[in-house]
Image: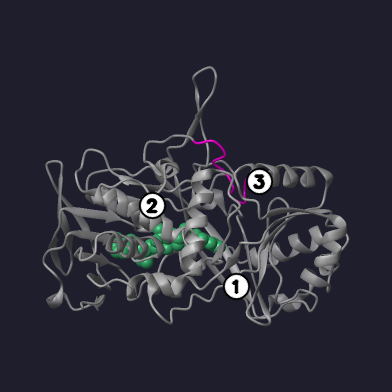
Amino acid sequence: MTQAKFLTNPAEMPKTADVIIIGGGPTGTAAAWAIERAAPGTRIVLLEQKSQLAAGASLASLENFRTCWAAPCLHKMMLRSIDVFHHAEDYFGEGVNLGIKQQGYLFIGFTPKQAAVLKSDVEHLHRCGLNHMEYVEADEIKNRYPWLGDRVIAAKHDSMAGWLDSNALVYAFARATQSTTFILESKDARIRVEGNQIKGVSTAQGDIDAPNVVIAAGAGARALGRTAGIELPIVVRPRQSFTTGWRHEAFPEESPCIISASPHPHVRPEAQTGAIFGWEYTINSKKINPEQDGHDDSLINPIQPVDSLKDPRFPSMTLSLLARQFGHKPGEGFGDTRYLRGIFHRIGYYVYRDNAYITRPDGTRESYASQRAIIDKWPGIDGLFLTIAHVGHGIMSAPAAGEILASRVLGRDLPDPAFSAFGLDVPWVEHDSGGLSDG
Ligand SMILES: Cc1cc2nc3c(=O)[nH]c(=O)nc-3n(C[C@H](O)[C@H](O)[C@H](O)COP(=O)(O)OP(=O)(O)OC[C@H]3O[C@@H](n4cnc5c(N)ncnc54)[C@H](O)[C@@H]3O)c2cc1C
């Protein structure tokens, strides 16, 4: 039996392949895994520019997963993926451990208006068949989560949510393959097209001929598309997170991930004593892009290294926001300065499709920040495929995204008709929301 190979030596690089995948993050590795499962023996070459896989946005991620997405295409994608996570040994091999903690997600409300929104969200999700979703009233919150304090009056609970080890997931996808060759430190990939047909990829280490190429390069996707003479309809937005080695005593290790009210700072326990925080904070928008208005930090061309965009105030701002929302005084709870010792602050890009719009009754178009990835073939170039724009959920959705991509590459039916919503030219689907900045 052949096995996944990891190479850096150009002399050993295959000269031909059936499929070349560019990008070794969650979506590229998931694509290799899913194509092989659907068509064993497919000769795949995956090109990763760094010396290890999972070297993009997943490095900054909170590694969370949840089912509560309002659009059917999104919650079906997460349900399928979570099923794969829970059967990791069946899908990836004996002994594979993804470090899953299924401790739930708790979206909380402090005002009657926020409570009403949470309640109507849960009603909608029940109508979609997500019957595990629960609206939790104030008394029950005090009973289950007394440490949240008196200000919290309502919550939406997703008991199927949790978090995992995203690096373990990416390497599980990779190691489960048998006919995929992973080329690390692959530099200067350029897609070769003749007429309207993919011919392969040229790299600084040599050329590989193949009839199919998949762009799975996260924030690097648009630049790669240009090597094939196309402009991909995506924008990127910098997003930050940080981990602390300490958390306040009342915040228990078994807590769900807490998603606070708008602007939705979120936090979950990390390891035995720490916590991990995130927030879709619109950073330095004037600084990074003087053309934009103050609230739009989207970029056509990502600024690299993305670390240069870190806002050093982000950890203290997030903690003060949480302390204010929960009513913690300085020195108490999230207001305790011990949180600020030994912080590991990270940043990466969310990648969004930039071609989603609603058509108003008068026929004019209003664009919106879609949560839908693009998983499709590119029209006009035979053999070019995309798995891009995975926004803030490319880890939790990776297995299903891989399967959708595999069906596109192999010319088979989609695993679920709802997944046609990930088509390149689908401008709108109902309830296409659920990013945490919506509030
Ligand atoms: C702060 C933050 C928090 C997040 N939290 C979560 C979360 O809790 N749950 C969740 O599911 N998702 C989360 N995400 C989103 C998630 O990280 C992304 O959706 C996911 O990583 C996208 O996967 P990807 O494979 O498309 O891209 P990436 O993870 O960016 O991987 C792309 C890979 O392609 C490589 N590459 C790029 N260009 C080239 C090239 N030209 N040649 C060769 N290789 C190339 C890169 O080096 C990288 O390894 C978060 C993201 C951020 C920034």
Of circles 2 and 1, the one toward us is: 1
Quadrant containing the C terminus in the rendered view? top right
The tag on residue 20 is none
Where does label 3 land, which residue? 126
Q: What element carries label 2?
A: strand
* Left or right: residue 27 compared with residue 366: left
Distance from the alpha carbon under mark 1 to that under mark 3 = 24 Å
Q: Name the spot of residue 143 as percent of width and height, x first.
A: 85, 65
Q: Is the magenta stretch mostly helix, strand or loop?
A: loop
Queried on whether the Cβ of the residue with tag 1 lies below 8 angstroms from ligand 1, the answer reads: no
Where does label 1 land, which residue? 101
Q: Give the range drawn in magenta.
A: 429-439
Q: Name the spot of residue 9 as percent of width and height, x first.
A: 18, 79
Where does label 2 land, which residue? 388
Queried on whether the Cβ of the residue with tag 2 lies below 8 angstroms from ligand 1, the answer reads: yes
Q: Which of marks 3 and 2 precedes in the sequence?
A: 3
Residue at (43% x, 78% y) in the render = 96
Q: Is mark 3 on a helix, strand or loop?
A: helix
Q: Which amino acid does label 1 sit on?
A: Lys
Q: Does the magenta stretch include residue 198?
A: no
Residue at (75% x, 62% y) in the render = 322
Of circles 2 and 3, the one toward us is: 3
When the figure is inspected, residue 263 is found, relative to residue 88, above or below; the finding is: above
Residue found at the very far top of the displayed protein: 362
Residue at (21% x, 57% y) in the render = 190
